[in-house]
Image (cartoon, rainbow, N blue to C red):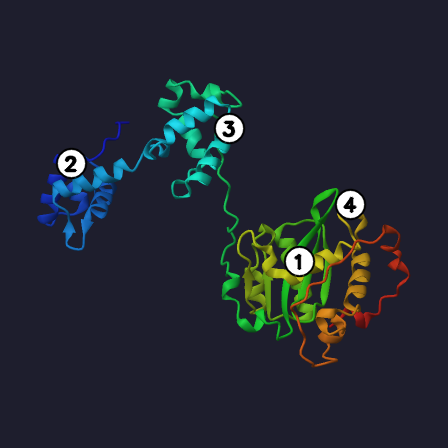
């Protein structure tokens, strides 16, 4: 394989002549022994509204771009000496970068940029890797974090209608999963109505998307829904099944912002009163979840004018509901948590 070389001034002159003659990028590339994609990129980078630049201007543009490459440590005045001095004082790169960025916020730099220069040719020649807390002669591979927004056909919560945001209508749900100690697979699917705070709890033995979406489908078939708001977990990647089957939209929080579905997040805090994380996952059964849902749906809420979620869900009182308050739930002793076995769950209480 031949070594790649940058396009020279002489080649740019030939490209200019070819463009003026009406030649295609492929024809120009063939005459220069270059790949057609290289010529296409060159014409794209060094053109203005009138076409490809004169060879000398195109060369100057390329030189300017090249000057912006290289290590940031070298390009920022004074930073090189600053880094060397602090390394000799036993500072770690993250401390050097943080302190520099604090003092010179308009010339901020990351510790990864410092590591790149330290393990680069100049840094190695100066023996800088030996001054690091972990004096490795070669740095290991740095793995980039994968994006959390890999859900197909994802619709941002920013596009959710204002009527849903204002909690003025029933039927708009928020969903999430709750896990317990002993299993990162077994989970509880929590679905909460934004207006009434009516909750339905479903036990899943796995967090595979097919299983979780199937549980959501069963809940929606039984109770109905007009929309669902979720987070960006891969367990919800099959949400398009909900949209196709029930003709309702699904919305997703911004990455790293689960608080945007505050109703279900608050419900999860309330749920932890009954099933704290320390409780083994196999002890959380669907029967227990039905009993817990009965208690939660029949407890008056300040945010509902001291009505219960069941009453609001069934239209017992049409007064405006103030939804700005948040409930802070204390965590009780474990003795009373699973004494709900004595409660006989009414069938009407578990239905809208």
Q: Upstream in the sequence, badge 4 or badge 2?
A: 2
* Residue 265 against residue 40 in the figure, above or below: below
The residue beneath circle 3 is 92
Classify 10 Å Cα crowding around label 2: few (below 14), some (14-19), many (20 and above): some
C-alpha span from label 2 to label 1: 62 Å
Rendered image: mark on residue 32: 2
C-alpha span from label 4 to label 2: 69 Å
Rendered image: mark on residue 278: 4
Q: Upstream in the sequence, badge 4 or badge 3?
A: 3
**Left or right: residue 51 compared with residue 195:** left
C-alpha span from label 3 to label 2: 49 Å
At 42% from the left and 43% from the top, the residue drawn is 105
C-alpha span from label 4 to label 1: 19 Å
Kindly state the secondary structure of the residue where label 3 is placed: loop
At 14% from the left and 47% from the top, the residue drawn is 53
Are the two marked residues, 2 and 1, in contact with CB atoms closer than 8 angstroms?
Answer: no
Locate residue 318, reporting x and y percent. 70, 81
Q: Upstream in the sequence, badge 1 or badge 3?
A: 3
Front tag of 4 and 3: 3
Are the two marked residues, 4 and 2, in contact with CB atoms closer than 8 angstroms?
Answer: no
Q: Upstream in the sequence, badge 2 or badge 1?
A: 2
138 and 293: which is toward the camera: 138
Can you say which quadrant of the picture contains the C terminus? bottom right
Front tag of 3 and 2: 3
Q: Upstream in the sequence, badge 3 or badge 2?
A: 2
The residue beneath circle 1 is 265
Locate residue 307, reporting x and y percent. 76, 74
Are the two marked residues, 3 and 2, in contact with CB atoms closer than 8 angstroms?
Answer: no
Are the two marked residues, 1 and 3, in contact with CB atoms closer than 8 angstroms?
Answer: no
Kindly state the secondary structure of the residue where label 1 is placed: helix
């Amino acid at each position: 394989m031949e070594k790649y070389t940058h396009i020279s001034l002489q080649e740019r002159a030939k490209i200019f002549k070819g463009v003026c003659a009406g030649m295609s990028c492929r024809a120009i590339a063939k005459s220069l022994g270059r790949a057609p994609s290289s010529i296409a990129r060159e014409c794209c980078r060094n053109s203005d509204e009138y076409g490809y630049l004169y060879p000398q201007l195109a060369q100057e543009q390329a030189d300017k771009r090249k000057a912006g490459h290289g290590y940031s440590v070298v390009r920022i005045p004074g930073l090189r000496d600053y880094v060397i001095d602090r390394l000799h004082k036993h500072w770690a790169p993250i401390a050097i970068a943080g302190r520099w960025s604090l003092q010179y916020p308009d010339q901020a730099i990351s510790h990864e940029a410092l590591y790149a220069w330290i393990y680069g040719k100049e840094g190695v020649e100066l023996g800088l890797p030996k001054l690091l807390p972990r004096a490795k002669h070669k740095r290991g591979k740095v793995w980039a974090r994968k994006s959390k927004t890999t859900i197909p056909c994802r619709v941002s919560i920013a596009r959710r209608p204002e009527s849903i945001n204002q909690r003025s209508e029933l039927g708009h749900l928020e969903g999430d999963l709750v896990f317990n100690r002993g299993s990162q697979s077994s989970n509880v699917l929590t679905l909460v109505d934004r207006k009434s705070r009516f909750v339905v709890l479903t036990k899943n033995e796995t967090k595979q998307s097919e299983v979780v979406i199937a549980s959501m489908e069963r809940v929606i078939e039984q109770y109905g829904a007009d929309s669902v708001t979720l987070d960006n977990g891969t367990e919800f990647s099959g949400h398009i099944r909900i949209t196709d089957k029930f003709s309702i939209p699904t919305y997703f929080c911004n990455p790293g912002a689960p608080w945007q579905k505050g109703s279900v997040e608050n419900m999860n805090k309330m749920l932890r009163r009954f099933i704290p994380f320390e409780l083994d996952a196999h002890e959380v059964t669907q029967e227990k979840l039905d009993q817990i849902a009965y208690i939660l749906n029949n407890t008056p809420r300040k945010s509902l004018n001291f009505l219960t979620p069941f009453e609001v869900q069934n239209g017992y009182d049409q007064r405006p509901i103030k939804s700005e308050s948040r409930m802070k739930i204390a965590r009780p002793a474990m003795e009373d948590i699973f004494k709900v076995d004595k409660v006989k769950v009414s069938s009407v209480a578990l239905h809208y």
